[in-house]
Amino acid sequence: MSFPWAKEYTPAHPFMKWMDEKLPVPRLIYNAVGGGYEVPRNLNYFWNFGFLAGLCLVIQIVTGIVMAMHYAANTGVAFDTIEMTVRDVNWGWMFRYAHANGASAFFVVIYIHIFRGFYYGSYKAPREMVWLLGVVIFLLMMATAFMGYVLPWGQMSFWGAKVITGLFGAIPFVGEPLQQWLLGGFAPDNAALNRFFSLHYLLPFVILGVVILHIWALHIPGSSNPTGVEIKSESDTVPFYPYYVAKDGWAIGVFAIAFAAMVFFFPNALGHPDNYIPANPMSTPAHIVPEWYFWPFYAILRAFTQDFFFIPAKLMGVLAMFGAILVWFFLPWLDKSPVRSGSYRPTYKKFFWFGLIPAMAVLFYCGGAPAAEPYVMFSQIAGLYYFAHFLIILPVVSAIEKPLPLPYSITEAVLGKDEGAELAPSA
Amino acid sequence: MAEEDGVRRRDFINIAAVSAAGVAGVGVVIPMVSQMSASADVLAASSTEVDISNIDPGQAIKAVFRKQPVFVRNLTPKEISEANAVPLSSLRDPQTLAERTKEGKENWLITMGVCTHLGCVPLGAGEGENRGEFGGYFCPCHGSAYDTAARIRKGPAPKNLEVPEYEFTSDTVVKIG
Amino acid sequence: MARILSILVGLFFTVALAWSFGKGAYTQITEPPALTAEHEFHLHPKKVHFASDGAFGKFDRQQLQRGFQVYKEVCSACHSLSHVAFRDLAQLGYSEAEVKAIAAGFSVPGTDPNTGEATMRPGTPTDYFPKPFANDIAARAANNNAVPPDLSLMTKARHNGPAYVYSLLTGFTEQPAELLKEFPEAKTPSGLHYNPYFANLNLAMAPPLTADGQVEYGDGTKPTVDQMAKDVSAFLIWTAEPKLEKRKQTGWAVLGFLLFATILGYMSYRNIWAGKKH
């Protein structure tokens, strides 16, 4: 939606006028991230992470294209081509480290982006579609990251491929043929490596497509904001350019400093040493774990240690792991609260800060720990809370909780009641 | 006045910030361009040693240097005199046979087997191949003909076949590169 | 309706987890897991400092050359270094002629140009370090059924790799008496060697550095076992990441620029938002 006070794109130069008639891309950009897009003036820094996520996608695509120029998807040479890239290609080491750490950076940013959505109720109407597309992006990212991790064909690559495709083996009846179909064989080998490479190159562009839809869907109602109160008048908003361009711009700087510190000084801190050992199908590393961004879901997978009635523990774990993300799709309809922002929902806020966040922290920690006690017991308790939070606590609390009084408008929230009332025309 | 200075200072900061972003962009492009140039393992010039003891006068062999063919030809006295008989002024790329061989080893003509037109491999090194109307090499792609000193005589190629760097490490071994 | 469904699904998962938790906790209490010898006697790597450590770390090229000598004279009998080419040794400070001489001292697999048969020929700078065994089966057969791992990436392929290599090389001891008393069945099998820095405490490799002076250094450094272990660990830091120095130097330049650009960006942001309450 374009607000009535949004500035219209008016090309001045004859070339721009000509362009506007033939292919109005400049108009599109102006209305999307330029002066024509009105944004709530009260966004806090958590709202920078959407832009940063887009930047991460660009970093990954660019460094990934470079890596693909030197990589060969063949089990005989895959490991060596990566080493060759790092040792002999000009700046190859930098692209390699940037691509590997870029995946981690992307997930850091996206987790903050998602939890921003949880806290401020960004998934609620009228932004359900934005949220649904966002969850799709997250799933695509997980698939892409997983397949990318297989490509260096180190020990973790190989055993990751084996274990994750093994998850599909848990599905009753079709599991085993499905796993074989996914791998194109009985175990990960050339067929699997080649298709993973093909898909790892394809999926980022699919993500890019869904990102465009995500932004398109966002621009219909416009951005949410920390109060959760919808935009009422011109004084509630500022144009994206120059205000949020400047704010995102300096946020990029902060992000880039953190990212460069990782790439240049701790490039292997988030990786697993075993992936510097070439894949050996005959011997599993003592302690296999996925990359850190999968840990919460990996912890949930491992938390189901007992058969539940007629459902085997293995299937239960797989169901729960996928269920833990799929439940996000239903959030817009599980949350019945008339208020979006957690800031005005005292009970929900407590469950968020003292329930969900600690539970996630425990799941993160335990997912990376060995599959031994007490970690399994911790992840069982945390996983229990995780499901209870979204499926039981949220629907119940949102229905019975009495929210705090909301400000009349964003302007009032920012400027205070008196000053705000002057600026805002009576509705 | 003070107001205007403030405005100018602010503009300056914005321009500086945008310029810094531009510099960062260039800084990213440089390694991206650089990574496509030959990598260290490719550049580590591999030299090739060729055993020439089995090449009789009038014969030639193909060796490999930097992933491209090299022609090593043992010229006959007739071929040498033919080459020396050509007036330099008539050549497109004037060079004498002596300039294209090592002193005392004028019968050993060592050239890249890469046509200087567009890079095809000329015929003439193999037994029974078409050596063109000047008795040297003939490139079938676009009809360049080289003489017995592998100099361009006819056709679109601009230069003589390139003579790589080489040395005789013994009477029977040539080290190319 | 949606809410009732959601609560039912929620109960399904939470009850299943509670069931797993309950059974797990019960087992934990009734049958506490037995401690293992690894659990009690495995040691973290010793603390050791290398010139290349830290954000400003640089290689000590003299040390790398000594470490290379240790690799060449001791380790290379069993361990390959397959990602390193002789030409890379120029980075250790060797001259071109020295690199050629080192390469020629190794024989590498080649092809007879006349017969096409596989032969061995002297190495050239573009060759990679040859493998001591033709394949894993040969390696296994010659080494008590254990394959000596490639060392090129060893310091990146273990947690705290450089210290791990150093500790392992200097960590061979007699099996402690307490261990045998507590876990009599954990006695080091014959043919293996006790080393508390190895994950399962017993490894097939015999202590490779046994006596001071095993390698004769040309630069006057005293070749104690400790010194040799440290030098070869430093060398393996280099083989695992020859670009380490360039990485750190580039890092400082990039960070410096980014800091400057970010401060400008922040000032510009403050300018643009000046007077706009938010």
Image: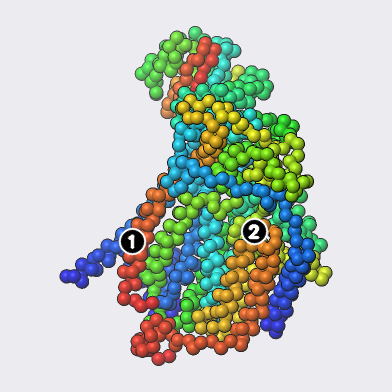
Q: Residue at x 60, y 74 (%)?
A: A355
Q: Position of residue A6 (x, y in %)?
A: 40, 77
Q: Amino acid at mark 1?
A: Leu
Secondary structure of residue under mark 2: loop
Q: Residue furthest left?
A: B1
Q: Residue furthest bottom?
A: A426
Mark 2, residue position: A369
Q: Examine the rendered structure and indicate whether residue A185 appears above or below residue A245.
A: above
Name the foreground residue: A332 vs A18. A332
Q: Position of residue A129 (x, y in %)?
A: 57, 74
10 Å crowding of disc 1: few (<14), some (14-19), many (20+) = many
Name the foreground residue: C178 vs C209. C178
Q: Quadrant of the C terminus of chain A?
A: bottom left
Q: How is the image coloured?
A: rainbow
Q: In which chain is the residue bearing label 2?
A: A
Mark 1, residue position: C264
| Mark 1 to mark 2 CA distance (whole Å) | 42 Å
Q: Amino acid at mark 2?
A: Ala
Name the foreground residue: A101 vs A205. A101
Q: Position of residue A119 (x, y in %)?
A: 54, 75
Co-location on one chain, circles 1 and 2: no
